[in-house]
Amino acid sequence: MEKNVEIDNKAIGQRIRVEREKLGLSRGEFAEIIELSDYYVGQLERGERQMSLPVLVKIASCLHVSLDYLIWGKNTYDAYYIRDAYNMYDAFDSNKDAELNELINKCSPKELELVKKLIKTVLPYVGKN
């Protein structure tokens, strides 16, 4: 017996918008990064259009979320699996953390805000190639 599964485009669009905003990206900036039109991204975020699988993968990759999360609103596997797929465990090496902590501890509150904004701006481009 086949089970019909209904895809909720509005919920997917809402999750895309929330994750985009978490990164501090405007719709236009996000559209430019994923190489889609601002108008089309707006339609996706409002749930007016259903996207192709390649577009969904591009969006999930840019937002650093899983396809499961975008489609169903939850991950069906451990979130560390995604990090491991991109060799991110190496990034949490204690020697590297110490260097990063040392740099961050030298920052003023205003500089820390700038660093956070910079990370949010650069993050969607990581692993794009």
Image (cartoon, grey):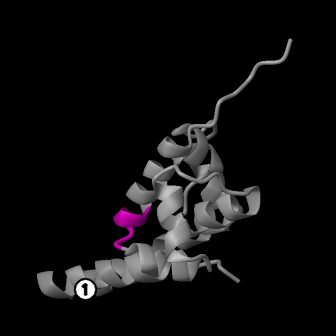
Out of 69 and 31, give the one closest to the viewer.
31
- Mark 1 neighbour density, 10 Å: few (under 14) some (14–19) many (20 or more): few
Helix, strand or loop: magenta stretch: helix
The residue at which mark 1 appears reads as 114
Amino acid of disc 1: Leu
The N terminus, quarter of image? top right
Image location of residue 120, percent across then percent down: 39, 76
Give the residue at x 51% y 49%: 47
Q: Does residue 68 sit above or below 51 in this rendering?
A: above
Image location of residue 51, percent across then percent down: 67, 56
Query: Quick check: is 71 in the magenta stretch?
Result: no
Q: How many marks?
A: 1
Out of 27 and 105, give the one closest to the viewer.
27
Residue 8 is at least partly visible in this image: yes
Out of 47 and 124, give the one closest to the viewer.
47
User: Could you tell whether 73 is left or right of 99 in the image?
Assistant: right
Residue 96 is at least partly visible in this image: no
Q: Of helix, strand and loop, which one carries label 1?
A: helix
Give the residue at x 30% y 77%: 116
Q: Does residue 75 sit above or below 113 in this rendering?
A: above
User: Could you tell whether 20 is left or right of 69 in the image?
Assistant: left
The C terminus, quarter of image? bottom right
Out of 21 and 74, give the one closest to the viewer.
21
Image location of residue 86, percent across then percent down: 67, 67
Q: Quadrant of residue 113?
A: bottom left
The residue stretch that appears in magenta: 20-24
Give the residue at x 73% y 57%: 52
User: Could you tell whether 74 is left or right of 121 in the image?
Assistant: right
